[in-house]
């Protein structure tokens, strides 16, 4: 491994387009060799993928959310149902509206730390816009229900 692996990342993506930024909006990202050696090649690849893609993917998601007409939609997370703004992701709504902390890392749909269940399928809550009638079950809630079921036996 090289002594230091460096690349440039965007720090601020509030401008139009996922890659539009001036030099003042960029920051250095460095992985020391000890981190690279301690990780498997898959872990290294995932860490680099998150480091390189999270800002452009977040900007793309924000652009997609702005295109959704602003209205109130009915969403259920675990056993709680509320009317929420349509211009947000499931993760944003869970934190802001439901006060439920779904674990997350990249907030760009890359890592999968924020997965939850929707219609029996796993979704990445940080990269899924809320839709009317959504029913979300967080994985920690599912595990609690499983634990309760085995404790009752």
Image (tube, rainbow, N blue to C red):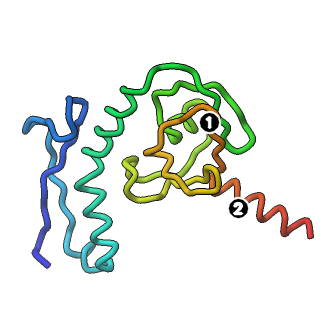
Which element carries disc 2, helix, strand or loop? helix
Residue under the image location 14 percent in, 42 percent down? 26
Q: Which mark is residue 99?
A: 1
| Cα–Cα gap, marks 2 and 1 | 19 Å
The image quadrant of residue 147 is bottom right
Give the residue drawn at x 18%, y 55%.
29
Q: Give the camera-side residue of 83 and 102.
A: 83
Looking at the image, residue 32 sits to the left or right of residue 65; the answer is left
The residue at the far right in this view is 153
> At which x and y percent is residue 96?
55, 31
Q: Is residue 137 left or right of residue 66?
A: right
Quarter holding the N terminus is: bottom left
**Residue at 84%, 64% in the rendered image:** 149
Answer left or right for 73 relative to 54: right
Which residue lies under the disc numbered 2? 143
Residue sitting at x 63%, y 45%: 136
State whether residue 43 is above or below residue 18. Answer: below
Percent position (x, y) of residue 79?
Answer: 75, 41
């Amino acid at each position: 491994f090289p002594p230091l692996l460096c690349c440039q990342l965007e720090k601020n993506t509030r401008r139009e387009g996922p890659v539009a930024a001036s030099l003042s909006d960029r920051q250095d990202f460095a992985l020391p060799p000890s981190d690279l050696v301690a990780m498997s090649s898959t872990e290294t690849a995932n860490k680099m993928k998150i480091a390189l893609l999270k800002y452009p993917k977040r900007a793309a998601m924000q652009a997609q959310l702005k295109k959704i007409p602003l209205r109130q939609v009915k969403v259920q997370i675990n056993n709680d149902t509320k009317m929420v703004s349509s211009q947000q992701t499931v993760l944003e709504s869970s934190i802001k509206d439901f006060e439920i902390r779904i674990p997350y890392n990249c907030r760009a749909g890359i890592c999968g730390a924020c997965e939850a269940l929707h219609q029996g399928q796993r979704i990445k809550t940080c990269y899924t816009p809320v839709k009317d009638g959504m029913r979300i079950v967080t994985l920690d809630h599912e595990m609690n229900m499983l634990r309760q079921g085995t404790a009752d036996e």
